[in-house]
Image (cartoon, rainbow, N blue to C red):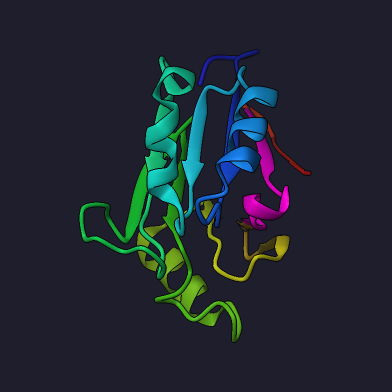
Amino acid sequence: MAPGEKIKILLLSDSHSNNNALVTVLLQNNDADVIIHCGDGQDDLDGFMPLLYGKSVYRVEGNWHTYGATPRRITTVIGGRTFYISHGFDERVKTDLTGLKYRAALEKADIVCYGHTHQQHDETDSGVRYINPGAVFEGRYAVIELTDEDVNVTMW
């Protein structure tokens, strides 16, 4: 990442076919460079392809409306940081984050994005940032701003 460069990531999860909530958030954050959907409604994005034009889009399958066409988890590098993206169902995040932390260590993740609980969460543990944006069908989401020196998260 070049000095002074900023990457804006719109982090979504659990839209559950509430297209009104989804389009509102997409329009409010049309300047996002990257969109991540952490499952349970990941295919809802298909109805808004013009709003996704020119953006990098990552999405994983959740435990609701699973068709097998979308990966269950993704590890990718954005802005020089390794992201692990999962719905969280397989890691049993409704119990605790132990499974998610195990996967994060295996993937050597810097930032972990997950959903499933419908509850917003942002914590750093052992140098890894864990972010759950909450459920977009309830109007909740997160914006991650990456710079060469920092990771800023804003919950909405």
Residue 91: x %, y % from top left: 44, 77
Residue 68: x %, y % from top left: 21, 60
Residue in the foreground of this view, choosing between 67 and 119: 67
Asked whether residue 137 is drawn in magenta, I would say yes
Q: In this rendering, is residue 74 above or below 120? A: above
Which quarter shows the C terminus?
top right
User: Residue shown at 43%/37% (left/top)?
Assistant: 45
User: Residue shown at 53%/15% (left/top)?
Assistant: 2
Residue 100: x %, y % from top left: 49, 72
How many tags in the picture? 0
Q: In this rendering, is residue 5 above or below 129? A: above
Residue in the foreground of this view, choosing between 89 and 46: 46
User: Residue shown at 62%/65% (left/top)?
Assistant: 126
User: Residue shown at 62%/17% (left/top)?
Assistant: 31
Residue 75: x %, y % from top left: 35, 50
Residue extending farthest left: 69
Q: Which residues are magenta?
A: 132-146
Asked whether residue 115 is drawn in magenta, I would say no
Q: In this rendering, is residue 98 above or below 142? A: below
The quadrant in which residue 154 appears is: top right
Left or right of 44: which side holds 150? right
Residue extending farthest bottom: 95
The quadrant in which residue 117 appears is: bottom right
